[in-house]
């Protein structure tokens, strides 16, 4: 790991976190609605709102327990979690640098003691009994032994400092490896989420269009109630129903069937999701008064049934 640019790595991660929702994030796992059995997995920020607006894990092909594991992992990789990891990495780097400086100081100290001992040994060799340079050879010998012990202690400290430096290096390498693994796993997870086949609904409810799917899921919502009393077209997978359900046309055409919203719901109540039933709001009545009256008073038939019967004829 000696070739890794620690400062650049940390700077890159911190720059990537700029503007990201503040952590810690949390993994929220619960029912979608009390009346539904499906489980959702969300990653929420401190305000308890999803950090990303998306359909959710439940729309992919994985089983729910796997979604829960993935969501928990993403929550762990929140800005606060990554910041803590980066802080720990920088602390290890600082400790390693200090350990190396300590090793250098101890080595210098040991070399100084060794040089002093050599100087004393040279002086000792020049001493004669009763000489004036030292009191006695025994005193010089005792001083040399003391220096030897000091050098031994200095070497012990140097070895200990070296071990601390090695341990700090190991911890730094482990932190970098964990950071790299986290980055790779996050990338894989992002790719898997992007490639997951989530069913896309063009819209469920807008001021101008509302689907049967939305009405069945949220029968008492504000959007559902706002359609009460509106005049609408009926739309299924092949297009907008003609008057009395006799064929298909486009919204806004003179032959498009216009009827009250409540009545229109009854005409498609039997339809399954494959029919893609929806209702389109009509602001201005389309067609003549006789057409509207005829559309209201005559019961409809399924356009598909009409066309099949015409084909048999």
Image (spheres, helix red, strand yellow):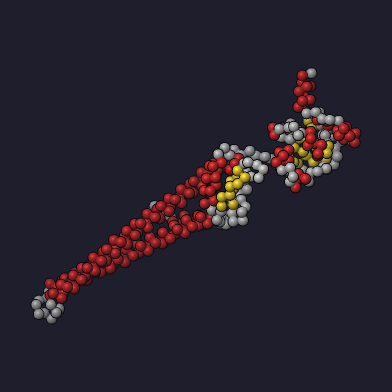
Q: Percent from the top left, x then y, of residue 313? A: 79, 18
Residue at point 30% right, 66% down? 106
Above or below, comparing residue 298 to residue 16 in the picture: above
Q: Looking at this rendering, what residue extends furthest in the right direction?
A: 290
Image-based side of 260 in relation to 132, left or right: right
Image-based side of 69 in relation to 2, left or right: right
- Residue 252 visible in this rendered orientation of the protein: no
Residue closest to the eye, 10 or 308 = 308
| Res. 218 image quadrant | top right
Image-based side of 282 in relation to 193, left or right: right
Image-based side of 25 in relation to 221, left or right: left
Residue closest to the eye, 221 or 291 = 221
- Residue 73 visible in this rendered orientation of the protein: yes
Above or below, comparing residue 188 to residue 156 in the picture: above
Residue at point 31% right, 60% down? 162
Residue at point 49% right, 57% down? 84
Q: Looking at this rendering, what residue extends furthest in the bottom direction?
A: 132
Residue at point 22% right, 68% down? 149
| Res. 204 image quadrant | top right
Q: Percent from the top left, x then y, of residue 79? A: 53, 55
Q: Percent from the top left, x then y, of residue 119? A: 19, 71
Residue closest to the eye, 298 or 113 = 298
Q: How many numbered marks appear? A: 0
Q: Percent from the top left, x then y, of residue 209? A: 75, 41
């Amino acid at each position: 790991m000696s070739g890794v640019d620690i400062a650049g790595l940390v700077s890159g991660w911190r720059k990537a976190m700029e503007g990201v929702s503040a952590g810690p994030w949390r993994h929220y796992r619960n029912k979608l609605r009390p009346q539904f059995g499906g489980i959702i997995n969300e990653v929420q920020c401190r305000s308890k709102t999803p950090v990303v607006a998306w359909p959710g894990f439940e729309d992919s092909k994985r089983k729910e327990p796997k979604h829960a594991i993935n969501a928990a992992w993403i929550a762990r990789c929140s800005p606060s979690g990554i910041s803590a990891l980066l802080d720990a990495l920088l602390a290890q780097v600082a400790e390693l640098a200090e350990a190396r400086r300590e090793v250098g100081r101890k080595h210098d100290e040991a070399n100084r003691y060794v040089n002093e001992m050599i100087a004393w040994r040279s002086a000792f060799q020049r001493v004669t009994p009763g000489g004036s340079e030292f009191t006695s050879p025994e005193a010089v010998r005792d001083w040399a032994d003391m220096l030897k012990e000091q050098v031994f202690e200095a070497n012990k400290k140097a070895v200990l400092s070296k071990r601390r430096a090695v341990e700090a290096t190991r911890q730094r390498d482990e932190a970098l490896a964990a950071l790299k693994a986290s980055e790779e796993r996050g990338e894989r997870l992002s790719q898997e989420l992007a490639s997951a086949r989530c069913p896309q609904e063009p819209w469920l409810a807008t001021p101008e269009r509302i689907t049967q799917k939305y009405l069945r899921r949220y029968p008492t919502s504000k959007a559902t109630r706002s359609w009460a009393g509106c005049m609408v077209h009926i739309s299924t997978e092949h297009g907008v129903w003609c008057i009395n359900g006799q064929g298909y046309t486009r919204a806004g055409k003179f032959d498009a069937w216009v009827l009250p919203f409540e009545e229109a719901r009854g005409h498609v109540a039997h339809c399954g999701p494959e029919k893609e039933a929806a209702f389109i709001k009509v602001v201005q009545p389309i067609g003549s008064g006789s057409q509207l009256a005829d559309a209201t008073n005559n019961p409809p038939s399924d356009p598909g049934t009409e066309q099949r019967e015409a084909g048999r004829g």
